Amino acid sequence: MTLTDQSPIAHERLTTMGAALRVALDGPYAAQRAVARATFPAEGALRPVDLDVEASRDWTLARLQELQAAGFGSAGVPDRAGGHGDPLEAALTFETLAACDLSVTIKSGVQFGLFGGAIMNLGTDWHHDAFLPGVTTMELLGCFAMTELGHGSDVASLETTITYLPETDELEVHSPTPGATKAYIGNAARDGRMAAVFGQLVVDGERHGVHTVLVPLRDERGATLPGVTVGDHGHKGGLLGIDNGTLRFDRVRVPRRMLLDKYGGITDEGAYTSPIADPGRRFFTMLGTLVRGRVCVGGGGAMAARRALSIATRHALRRRQFAAPGRPDGVLLLDYVVHQRRLLPLLARSYAFGAAQNQLIEAMAHVQGEDPSTEREQRELETFAAGLKSMQTWFANTAVQAAREACGGAGYLSENELTALRGDVDIFATFEGDNTVLMQLVAKALLTDYKQAWSALDRTGVVQATTRAVGGMVMERTSAGLMLERLAATARRRPDETTLVDRGWHALMFEERERHSLESLARRMRSAAKSGGDGFEAFNRLGPHVQFVARAHMERVTLAAFVALIDACEDPEARAVLETTCSLYALSSIAEDRAWFLEHSRMTTARSKVIGDQIDALCRELRPHALALVEGLGIPEAWLGAAILRD
């Protein structure tokens, strides 16, 4: 392969194929991502691995301040009322940060995405003018205090109270029980001076559900304010640069105007008012404005996987083991079929998720941008973000561990970055929503979009299920989804004529897996509702089926996105490599569920037996393009920081 200087990054030279694959994977945001790589201050971008907790926190704060000065901090958060907070800029900046140090990435997310985002999305012009300038300059460091010790994913049941006191026109913020303690809060242990606190708003003795109030935590000297108790979670399994801590409030009073009241507030006369009458709809509208966090966390996890796979694959192209005929100096690790099977299917899945992430970012930019959007588009964005965040962060943990093992003992050395990366990305599977819970939300969204759909468990744990089996697909189809449907329809007419690498057969298998599992789940839920008895236990037993449905849906959405990415690629040679990569992703996904396809007569035993051989053949076909595939992932070699890659 020849080399080219097409990359705008100083001194980065890519293969011609690598440059073409990078443009294809960057998709509609290729220009913005290229500029970000070119202007990112990458020198000193990785935290020294031997720093202790306090030194790590010092380094992370200083690094974020440096990045903010360079324009890579508060992207997407306006500094005044009426300013434009560009969601696209925020998402692309977050993934650029995630290509390097994840502590810095998450501290940026806490300060600008969560704390700043809460003010921007839930507050009004007064809040914007009063607080956003300090947020964007980092003069006002803040926290996002939602999670409690007693309530993680169950936000609606938070115990913290925000009670209106008409006699003083103040709000009293109180933690009534130990379970109401805010926990795992970034910036709380040391740096945060204010928190966006989520709690139950009580006005004139009546609860109005979860709202958000700004509560000062520390004075200008950093001393904790009266009534506020701060704890420090100390050393963690990763992200040592983040000062996670606990917060408790003992009847702390703040002025009424500190309530972020865009969707619900208190009038001068002391009465509760909201532009959204239905409490449930109001609650989900408030949480829906914060969907950007899930979009970013999922993308950040995917970037961690890319970084780990880049290190492991580049190492496998350098490291030799055991002499063989014609190879007296030893065989390159990546020439072993078993090593190819370790890494190349993961690279293929990285490309697949990259294509899906592009579509998710596009959907978010539309819904949260200047153009009008519908309530349905908002719901679909929330479902897409929940599912893709789960899939990408689970994948990140799998990929980082596989990369560590693929580098042998060297992968266990801190200087090669993989163990720190493994610790840092671990938590991505449970913050911004526990993945298992998020996948339940995906499955519920799929079911509720049918006519006469079922509703979720009510407060007494009774399942109200669909009155008939599902009869059609759920989400409004994008052009990518329609393309996949056409491919599947073609294969359905001639299934015996398709090969294992036929894209129509892949589409058919993905569609059948999603459709059949969704239909059978709806039937089982209807049966459970009719049978009476313990409704909760009936639903509880369907948990694994719910998870399978959500995963099958996300796999189909991801394949559709990958097919669309290939269709948009204008370079014929790069397109051919992407076609093979997509086949590897699709076959690997089908192989993981071979038992399901066999049990449901979607695949013959003979075809099932040869899938492994076909995956091996695809790996051999991609082996000459391994370096180009890694370059296409978009993380410059100079950013990887692994000693194992140094000459």
Image (cartoon, helix red, strand yellow):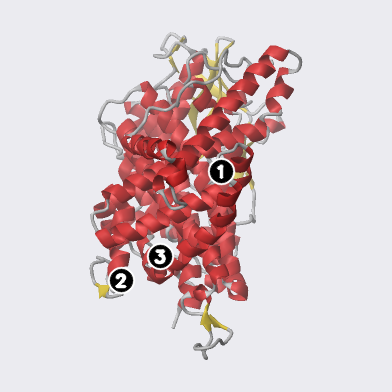
| Foreground: disc 2 or disc 1 | 1
Q: Amino acid at mark 2?
A: Thr
Q: Which mark is residue 603?
A: 1
- Horizontal and vertical percent for residue 300? 45, 51
Q: Say which of 168 and 100 sits in front.
A: 100
Identity of the amino acid at label 3?
Val
Q: Quadrant of the N terminus?
A: bottom left
In terms of image quadrants, where is residue 36? bottom left
Measured Cα–Cα span from mark 2 to mark 1: 39 Å
Q: Amino acid at mark 1?
A: Met
| 297 on left or right of 33 | right
Using the image, determine if residue 547 lies above or below residue 522.
below
Circle 3 Cα neighbour tier, 10 Å, few/some/many (<14 / 14–19 / ≥20): many
For residue 578, which quarter of the picture? bottom left
On residue 15, which mark appears?
2
Q: Nearer the viewer, residue 545 or 109?
A: 545
Asked whether residue 134 appears in the rendered view, the answer is no
Give the residue displayed 55% in from the left and 9% down from the top. Answer: 204
